[in-house]
Image (spheres, rainbow, N blue to C red):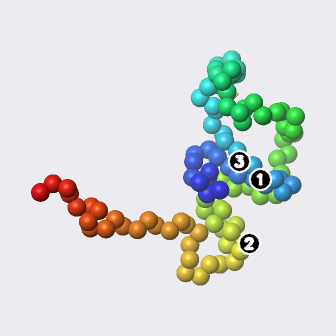
Amino acid sequence: MRWFLLHERTAVFVEKGDWYVLVYNPCQHLQADNRCGIYETRPQICRDYSTRNCEYEDSWVYDHYWELPEQVEEYAEAVLGPRRGRTFRSARPAAPSRSATRSTKG
Ligand code: SF4
């Protein structure tokens, strides 16, 4: 989830137990007339999309809503408790060994 939020103009929300990702950027194939520029070869996720469950009222109320990775960390700490001496970040990769960084020349 943090990965989604590391991208600009994205958000994650939870509503009635279902999790959603919001992408506020327009698709690169959306044409000026609001039609799909690759309609015949559009991705499956676009083919599966339906407006059947769209909400058209202005009262957007979610169970949870995050726009920043830091908000996820705060939420995780509030729900799971503080993680003493540990971080929610992924472990840093190990530095390459000296032999792996040595030049093959000379
Ligand atoms: S249908 Fe899919 S590919 Fe086409 S414009 Fe919309 S999001 Fe982009």
Q: Are marks 2 and 3 in contact (CB under 8 Å)?
A: no
Q: Real-space Cα distance between discs 3 and 1?
A: 7 Å
- Amino acid at circle 2: Val
- Amino acid at circle 3: Val
Circle 1 residues within 10 Å: few <14, some 14–19, many ≥20: few
What residue would you read off at disc 3?
21
Q: Looking at the image, which residue is at 70% across and 67% down?
A: 75
Residue 8 visible to an observer of this rendering: yes
Residue 68 visible to an observer of this rendering: no
Task: From the viewer's perspective, tell me whether residue 17 is left or right of residue 27.
Answer: right
Residue 39 lies, with reference to residue 46, above or below; the image says above
What residue would you read off at disc 2?
79
- Amino acid at circle 1: Trp
What residue would you read off at disc 1?
19
Task: From the viewer's perspective, tell me whether residue 14 is left or right of residue 12.
Answer: right
Circle 2 residues within 10 Å: few <14, some 14–19, many ≥20: few
Q: Looking at the image, which residue is at 72% across and 36% down?
A: 45
Q: Position of residue 64 (x, y in %)?
A: 77, 58
Residue 10 lies, with reference to residue 83, above or below; the image says above
Residue 88 quadrant: bottom right
